[in-house]
Amino acid sequence: MTRACLAALASHWRRNPLQSFAFLVGLALATALWSGVQAINAEARASYDAAVATLGDGQFDQILPRAGDRIAQQDFVTLRRAGWLVSPIIEGRLDGVRLLGFDPLSSPARFGVEGMAEAGDPDSFLSQGQLYATAETAQALGDGVTVLVEDTITPGIAVGDVGAVQQLLRRGDLSRLLVQPDQPLRRPALEDLAPHLRLQSASQSADVGELTESFHLNLTAFGLLSFAVGLFIVYSTIGLAFEQRRGMVRTLRALGVPLPHLITLMVAEVVALALVGAGIGVVLGYVIAALLLPDVAGTLRGLYGAEMAGTLQFRVSWWGSGMAIAVLGALAAAGGRLWQIARMPLLASARPRAWAMTLGNAQLVQGVGALGLLLCAGALAVWGSGLVAGFALLGCFLIGAALALPLLVRPVLALAEGTAKSPVARWFWADTRQQLPGLSLALMALLLAISANIGVATMVSSFRLTFVAFLDQRLAPELYVEAETAGQAAAIEAAAPRLGATALPLLVRDTQVAGQPTRLFGVRVGPTYRENWQFLAATPSAWDQVAAGTAAVANEQLARRAGLWIGDLVEVAPDRMLPLAAIVADYGNPRGQLVIGEALFQSLHPEVSARQFGLRTDDAATLRRALSDEVGIADSAITDQVALKAFSMSVFDRTFTVTAALNVLTLAVAGFAMLMCLLTLADLRVPQLAPVWALGLTRRRIGQLEVIRALVFAGVVCLFALPVGLGLAWVLLAIINVEAFGWRLPMYLFPADYARLGAYAILAAGTAAAWPAIRLMRVPPNALLKVFAHEH
Amino acid sequence: MTQADPALFLCGVQKTFAGADGPVRVLGGVDLTLAPGETLALTGESGSGKSTLLHIAGGLEVADAGTVRVAGHDLTGLSDSDRAVVRCRDVAVIFQQFNLIPSLNVADNIAFQARLAGRADMVLIGDLAARLGLSDQMRKYPEALSGGQQQRVAIARAIAARPQVLLADEPTGNLDESTAVQVLDQLLTLVADTGAALLLVTHSPTIAARMGRRLHLSRGVLA
Amino acid sequence: MSIRLVVFLLFWPVSVFAQGFAGLGTDAQGFEVPQAGPQFDFPADHGPHPDYRIEWWYLTANLTDVDGTPYGLQWTLFRTALAPGEDAGWASPQVWFAHAAVTTPQAHFATERFARGGVGVAGVQAEPFRAWIDEWAMEGPDFDTLTLTAQGPDFAYDMALQAQGPLVFHGQDGFSVKSAEGQASYYYSQPFYEIAGTLMLPDGPVEVTGNAWLDREWSSQPLSDNQSGWDWFSLSFDDGTNLMGFQLRQRDGTLYSASTWIEADGRTTAYPDGAFAAQPMTQSEVGGRDVPTTWQVQLPGRGVDVRVEALNTQAWMPLSIPYWEGPVVIEGSHTGVGYLEMTGYE
């Protein structure tokens, strides 16, 4: 019995290859987008870890000089001879390239040794001064240096043996020592051995982590939305296939197949198809990820100043989740239909009235569902809290909007029909309205795709604008210097005017404000702050008040966590209450911050002296050299903020490449959904179009009208997608981001982008309609005639 | 089933449907016995309940009261699934709308119920197809067949399953007159050959006259 | 030890160790090759020979504490050269690595170190004698009077050694042939050290005394291609005589053996291939493989027929180059203690 039934069920897919194709490809595309994005995320995450490991920063304790940035080689020998298992690192610059020398024998870090080991010549690494770098970096180094091209090494860095790098830099000393995690039983204290050195324990850079997390959240949200679009395709194909097989199900039951048996077989059928589709999708996802990975790698590359591997691993985490979500998605899509089939009476004729009622109810149910979901979304927006509520809100809002779409489109079409004058136009609009139920799932998919694209584009672009402003604000001084000692700090302040620079000392102290761990800053208020800082909210003379010591500025994280806003009083020190004059956006930083004037800070915390300085200058390179040579500041203690800014921008440009590619893919998926719906409807269209043809419309004209109809639908959907997409962006920026990271991104609008997306969408719809329209144009006249002579 | 068992035995069968203006009594206590090999025409006006009676006999619907025994199986109190098994093994139904499986070709359609019952006999099927003039149509799909041909496929499917009871609901109702006569002839010949009992619902006195016995159903009661 | 470093190391000539521990590159490649009839020059020859590819200072000791509990101790410094000769600073082609271990009847502690030559972290000088890597050292005014120290994350030791007899030379006056094809090394030993000192173990310090055996060997040539590993025995009998014997296992199932009989006064007799025989008796599972830990050892020419049994079968050295090395107890025609080293049991 099982075999006969399965053969009958399977014969449907064989006889309707287009439906099978739509099902498999729909699911494959959905899975592909999801697993592709997951693959990129997984790869990127793994690569951060590898990158952190590569440089040894943050992974191992390090020994650094208390002053300057050099350690005598004898110190290394002394430490080793005393039982300290340390490994030497020398760093320096040559032709703008960062040279990193290490000793592979004693190093706990990997430094891309992997590639070198594969290259297979450690002999030349140790004894022949061989350097390893990417092709680009090698070029920058010029001909004087032998460089072996090795793509796994961080761009801008050339790695070599400590001896070779010493020779290139004409130095006999070291920069720092990595400390092995396992140390022997007996070891003298570092202070006794080398009092001029200090031990710095491993730490991770939280700021960068937050930013990259944000990037991942973007990608994940995008992957999820794309998957939803793909599921709509699956839902519509399953709906169609099950609808068409209603009769078959009845016949099977009448011929004696027990219902539970039949349902079980149909579930198995869906799971089997889903596995095939998802399998194809995982492979496609791998291809997508492999194609996008170089861009993502580029995006994330420099965040740690370290390269991520350009190759993709087949990780269970992403292909497994892709398969699982595809099967669950397909079952969810089939669930409703199976439920209907399970409840369907064996004999259709028995209760015709009940069925009519059910059909009439469908629209009402859909309307009620849409309204319920949208109300739910509204309630979550107002009262919800937490990331889960944020995503639930996203889901309710999108599905609600999609369900509401056909109900909203119908009156628009009715209105058009009412205003149409010519008989052909009236027929066109009436016929369009008639097509609505058949196309509504495709239209919903299109709506989701366009909205998702609008939403994500808005989010990414808003993020970029905000971030640029933030970078301008925070990285305004050209150089940023951290002094090792109070003496150095004084020297920096003294030297700055002489070197034609303005020093902006930054006083820092960790404290508690309103019960929140907070970093208190004392700043020298000047044009740099006044011109570059953009506030989320501020009183008119905020900086004047800060300079006068009568007000403070809080970052958004602190303000939100402590529930403070403009005008609220904060206790900056015991018994010292100040009102908040402004709230400043502070992205990618988990900590609360409070900014007060330099003078007030000094009076509150006289024991704290400035160790960090922003330096404004016209010639950063000269100033940097002067600080190193004349003031003796370690090169590693000076940050070139102009370069940092440029780098950050390049990161975002990479983000755009990825986003744009995903935009095109989602629209393609939606276009495919539309094509599938139109193709399945095309066969049903023949009897509907035959009378119009008989009444004098040419087949060519009918075909043109079919394409126009698709364009009209796409246009109307675009109109509805705009508010939905903006709503989506708002949820992402104002709710999800706040819940995830504690800061809200201001939302900017990008009409040109939306117009472009709309044009793409209409193009996708037109393309999708073209093929069925051409098929209709080529229907032979006798097929149309047969409609009238059809035997009943 | 023993020799003495009737192929079909209905006793005091009642059925009421919910209607727009309250409950509608469709069958009001029907008694009916059909011996193996016997052919019986059930006639009646539209809405007289003859189709409902046939459905109950086939286990497609459940009687509100009364006893239904098909080929020795008491359907009373059987679950949906158990009734389906009886239907599959011992009963075959020929519908007015043919109810073929559109995605299977003629050969597979004919073999279908026999396969469900686990007793497909390809020689018998080939023989049936030949006798019904379907031999050239075996690879075609139902949509390519005329109504008469489709009903012949349905008849072949029913006979190929080798049921003890054949139920036919207006089998020629969708066919033109001359086709109808041909199809009926073929059906009766095959039934006679197999020795199955046939209960045939029709509103046509001409067709009813071809059956061994006739019963008229009026307002849910046999006359 | 990171796995990367292991991979890295395996590309080096050092990897030859993993096969047979005679540690000799595929061919001499510009290195000096041991020649028959060596003329040693002491104390200079206690120092390094950078023109040879591989060299070691290999000390093992059988110890007991005041309760009579037996212990084993190992201290080994290896030198391997990427190229012949010496150069200053990081450019030195000499690479040093060292193994240290302590074996008790219940436990086995082992650790290793790696260092580059040229910068002062590791090296050997002949006079006054000093061999060191990081804080590990074997040093003294001369080769007869030494102190010894090493440590790992979970153990340490500080020992003092005093030689009670002369150096002994293996093979033909210190020219030790390792295969029928003629691969050879320079090889001499000091088997007569008295040793005393302190072991730092997880349960606390233990005062120990006993005897130590120091091997010196250097060469540039590989084991024969068909040799897969070796079993090396240094046996100190209670009557004051000693026996050094090794057999190289060949892939065709045959063995190549050599041995030296050492009288209590240091006089030696070298025995050719086949005289010394060692039969594995029982296997123990250690470090995930089966290793023979009881042997029947015979040197018929001296009436030696003894059962050699590991003090602790789990004396596996789980280092970059894994092998088995531990103290043994001797019973049979002779009694005593000794050390057993087995390589190539992968």
Image (tube, rainbow, N blue to C red):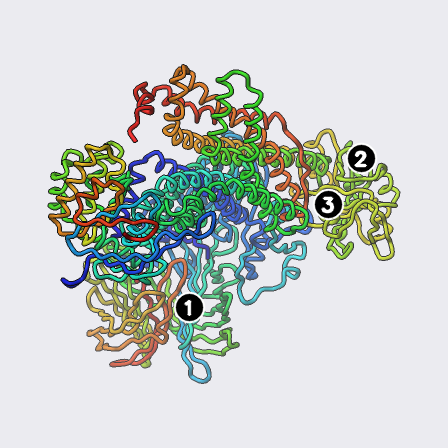
Q: Is residue A148 left or right of residue A91?
A: left
Which of marks 2 and 3 precedes in the sequence?
2
Q: Is there any visible trace of residue B68 in the rendered image?
A: yes
Which of A515 and B158 lies nearest the eye of the viewer? B158
Q: Which residue is mark 2?
A: A530
CA–CA distance between discs 3 and 2? 18 Å
Amino acid type at mark 1: Gln
- Amino acid at pointer 2: Arg
Residue A754's x, y, as percent? 59, 28
Identity of the residue drawn at 43% across and 63% down: C99
- Secondary structure under badge 1? strand
Which quadrant of the view contains residue A80? bottom right
Task: Examine the rendered structure and indicate whether residue A62 appears above or below residue A401.
Answer: below
Secondary structure under the numbered disc 2 in the rendered image? helix
Q: Secondary structure at mark 3?
A: helix
Rendered-image quadrant of the C terminus of chain C: bottom left
Along the line of sight, the residue nearer the viewer: C60 or A719: A719
Tell me if label 3 and label 1 are in contact, CB under 8 Å. no
Q: Residue beneath label 1, please?
A: C74
Mark 1 crowdedness (10 Å alpha carbons): few <14, some 14-19, many ≥20: many
Residue B90 point in image, percent of width and height: 21, 55
Separation of marks 2 and 1 at Cα, in angstroms: 71 Å
Q: Single out the mark in the foreground, 3 or 2.
A: 3
Quarter occupied by residue A10: top left
Front tag of 2 and 1? 2
Q: Chain of mark 2?
A: A
Using the rendered image, report if marks 2 and 1 lie on a common chain. Answer: no
Judge left or right: residue A188 versus residue A698.
Answer: right
Where residue A556 is drawn, which disc sits there?
Answer: 3
Residue type at the position of mark 3: Glu
